[in-house]
Amino acid sequence: VAAPPPPVAATKRQKAAALAGAAETDDDASPSSLPLYKLPIGAMWQELRHTHGWQYAKGHGGLGGDWFYARPGAAADRSTWVEGVDYFTSGEALQAWCRDHRIDGVERTGALDERPADDGPEPLCDLEGAELWGRLRKIGWATRRSTDASKPPYRYFRPGANLNEVPPLKAHFMYTLEDVHDFIVKYDIDGFARKGAIDEEYDGEEAEVTWHAKAPPKKKRRKPE
């Protein structure tokens, strides 16, 4: 199979402009001496691909039909991949992510098992409520209404869970954000090396899910006098 054409190919004018901009902010540093996140996208991608394990991948199975950029360590099961976390569909998105995460090609190469930089996002275990859920959604967690009237109204599913399975497996979801937070703390889910996906193992064992919450009591209807 022929190799795909590069998804991004900067023109000579674009490269010159990028190098000029880099020179303005980094004195007289040459492109080869700059951290990856300051390189033009073409040079950045060549370094990521040939030196640090990134790869081109053909989109399919819900990921689109174009070529995209996959991070080192992405799971074999692409159905668990999340755009902007496991892969990127454009050079612009890839470059912006590398800048935001200071992917320098030395201490940080963009692999999925890398811990965030010291100035990175707050650890998941320190978050609660909507802020925690906002971060979890970005790494593949999802919510659906419960079909069991005796339980709380929503279910919070781990990445990779079958959202249409009836009934869903108990180990694949939780009923409250409090239970989700307990799960995050118990298994040290960091959103990078550990996302809480259903196929992850912790200390050689599959995760166990604990439900603490019960459905709120139904209001009794007042009998007409």
Image: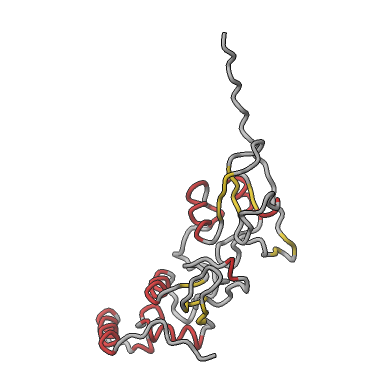
User: Which residue is at the front of the view, 160 or 130?
Assistant: 160
Q: Is the image coloured rainbow, by chain, by secondary structure, or in one colour? A: secondary structure
**Could you say where residue 153 lies in the image, as x and y percent from the top left?**
58, 40
Task: Please indicate whether residue 139 sits to the left or right of residue 185 in the image.
Answer: left
| Residue 27 in view of the camera | no
Q: Residue at x 48, y 67 (%)?
A: 83
Position of 67 with respect to 222 (left or right) is left
Q: In this view, does 145 lie above or below 78?
A: above
Q: In percent of the image, x 43 and y 87: which residue is there? A: 5
Name the residue at 55% across, 90% down.
1
Q: In screen coordinates, is 13 left or right of 197?
A: left
Residue situated in front as seen by the camera: 27 or 163: 163
Image check: 123 left or right of 11?
A: right
Front one among 122 and 98? 98
As drawn, 161 above or below 150: below
Q: Where is residue 225 in the image (x, y as percent from the top left)?
A: 57, 8
**Whether residue 182 can be seen here:** yes
**As drawn, which residue projects farthest toward the right?**
205
Q: Does 145 sit above or below residue 92?
A: above
Percent coordinates x, y for residue 103 in the rendering: 44, 76
The residue lying at 40 percent from left, 69 percent from top is: 100
Question: How many tags in the picture?
Answer: 0
76 is higher (above) or lower (below) than 129: below
Instruction: Give the image location of residue 114, x and y in percent.
Output: 55, 71
